[in-house]
Amino acid sequence: MAKANPVRKPKEAKRLADLVSKAMTPACKKRGFASVDIVASWADIVGDRYGTRVQPDRLIWPRQTELGDPDAPRQPATLVVHTDGATALMLSHESGQVIERINTFYGWAAIGRIKILQKPVSQKKTKSPKPLRSLTQSEEKRLDESVEGVENDRLRQALKKLGAQVIAKTGTL
């Protein structure tokens, strides 16, 4: 008598970040990064001023001595970045603050200094969101009715703006 095959459960959808991380991690490790996190989150870590104008290149870790204590804390690394000349000058003056932000991201003193190389940085093109459709008269009327009980004018306008965006995207409020 043949055994019946059990019903297969569909696999859960995987996040794109997990798939990209697996593909990029070997390349990042080759450049001294333990993971793709700092590269992927660079703009969030360093802020708008340096997010697109400075690019992390590699981490240079100091050599660990063979005879040293294996439980001793690791010495901080040198982060090599590249940017244009004007930004390099600004970054050199604010490198302490940038190091502090990176170390806060890692949760420990991973970076001790930043080495700046002046090379052109490839600018990532950001897609602007496509404009939302305009609301129909019936949708406008329904939206006005839903916020008419709000007494604060600024709050009412903010809710109306939010509602218009929700309706334009989804079609319902």
Image (cartoon, grey):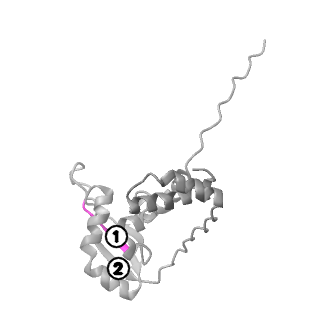
Q: Is residue 15 magenta?
A: no
In primary-sequence order, the first of circles 2 and 1 is 1
* Secondary structure state at the residue bearing disc 2: strand
Q: Is residue 78 magenta?
A: yes
Marks 2 & 1, CB-CB < 8 Å contact:
no
Q: Which residues are magenta?
A: 75-80
- Residue 95 in the image: above or below residue 132: below
In the picture of the structure, the residue carrying the numbered disc 1 is: 79
Which residue, as the protein is rendered here, is positioned at the far top?
1
Q: CA distance from mark 2 to mark 1?
A: 8 Å
Q: How many marks?
A: 2
Q: Mark 1 belongs to which amino acid?
A: Leu
Q: Nearer the viewer, residue 21 or 104?
A: 104
The residue lying at 63 percent from left, 62 percent from top is: 135
- Residue 4 in the image: above or below residue 138: above
Which residue, as the protein is rendered here, is positioned at the far bottom?
85
In the picture of the structure, the residue carrying the numbered disc 2 is: 116
Which residue, as the protein is rendered here, is positioned at the far right?
1
Badge 2 density bin: few <14, some 14–19, many ≥20, Cα 10 Å: many
- Does the rendering let one see residue 33? no
Q: Give the image location of residue 164, x and y in percent.
A: 55, 59
Q: Give the image location of residue 97, x and y in percent.
A: 26, 71
* Secondary structure state at the residue bearing disc 1: strand
Q: Nearer the viewer, residue 34 or 8?
A: 8
Q: Nearer the viewer, residue 26 or 133?
A: 133
Q: Mark 2 belongs to which amino acid?
A: Ile
Q: Is residue 135 left or right of residue 160?
A: right
Q: Give the image location of residue 108, x and y in percent.
A: 26, 56
